[in-house]
């Protein structure tokens, strides 16, 4: 199983209300995509944190993750949430099955 974590820096004009809407929109959009097994999104607790918004997703495999990246709903999410409100991102992928070679993820 592949766990994807995306950390985002926000534009200066993003208000707490916009962050709440980003969280709601992330969950409502990405859960519609069949390849996504789970979605989590949230905001920073520590005010000094460098990455104030995150999204994490689970996929059965890297192949399913690749299919997800071409999904029109994901492209809508990128446009309405990511590009509209963020300036920078850090994307990380992890294999969560113990003993599984990441080559076969």
Image (cartoon, helix red, strand yellow):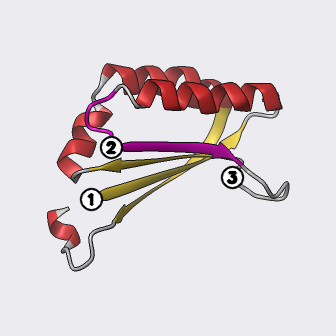
Q: Is residue 37 magenta?
A: yes
Q: Which mark is residue 1?
A: 1
Categorize mark 2 by other alpha carbons within 10 Å: few (<14), some (14-19), many (20+). Answer: some
**Residue 24's spot in the image, x, y percent?**
60, 28
Helix, strand or loop under label 3: loop
What is the distance, in whole Å, between disc 2 and disc 1 at their CAs? Answer: 10 Å
Q: Is residue 83 visible?
A: no
Q: Residue tagged by mark 2?
A: 37
In the displayed structure, 7 sits above or below 95; it is: above
Q: Are marks 3 and 1 in contact (CB under 8 Å)?
A: no
Query: Local crowd at mark 1 within 10 Å, few (<14), some, or many (≥20)?
Result: some
Q: In percent of the image, x 62 and y 23: which residue is there?
A: 84
Going from N to C along the chain, the mark reached first, 2 or 1, is 1
Quarter the C terminus occupies: bottom left
Q: Secondary structure at mark 1?
A: loop
Image coordinates of residue 91 in percent, x first then y, are 48, 53
Label 3 or label 1, whichever comes before in sequence order: 1
Place of residue 78 in the rendered image (x, y in percent of width and height, measured from the top left): 48, 28
Residue 71 is covered by the magenta coloring: no
Residue position marked by numbered label 3 in the rendering: 51
What range is drawn magenta here? 33-43
Nearest-to-viewer mark from 3 and 2: 2
């Amino acid at each position: 199983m592949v766990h994807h974590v995306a950390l985002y820096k926000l534009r200066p004009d993003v208000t707490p209300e916009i962050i709440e809407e980003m969280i709601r929109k992330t969950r409502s959009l990405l859960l519609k995509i069949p390849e996504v097994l789970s979605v989590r999104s949230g905001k920073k607790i520590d005010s000094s944190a460098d990455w104030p918004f995150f999204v994490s997703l689970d996929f059965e495999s890297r192949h399913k993750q690749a299919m997800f990246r071409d999904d029109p709903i994901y492209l809508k999410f990128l446009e309405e949430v990511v590009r509209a409100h963020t300036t920078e991102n850090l994307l990380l992928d992890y294999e969560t099955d113990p003993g599984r070679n990441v080559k076969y993820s």
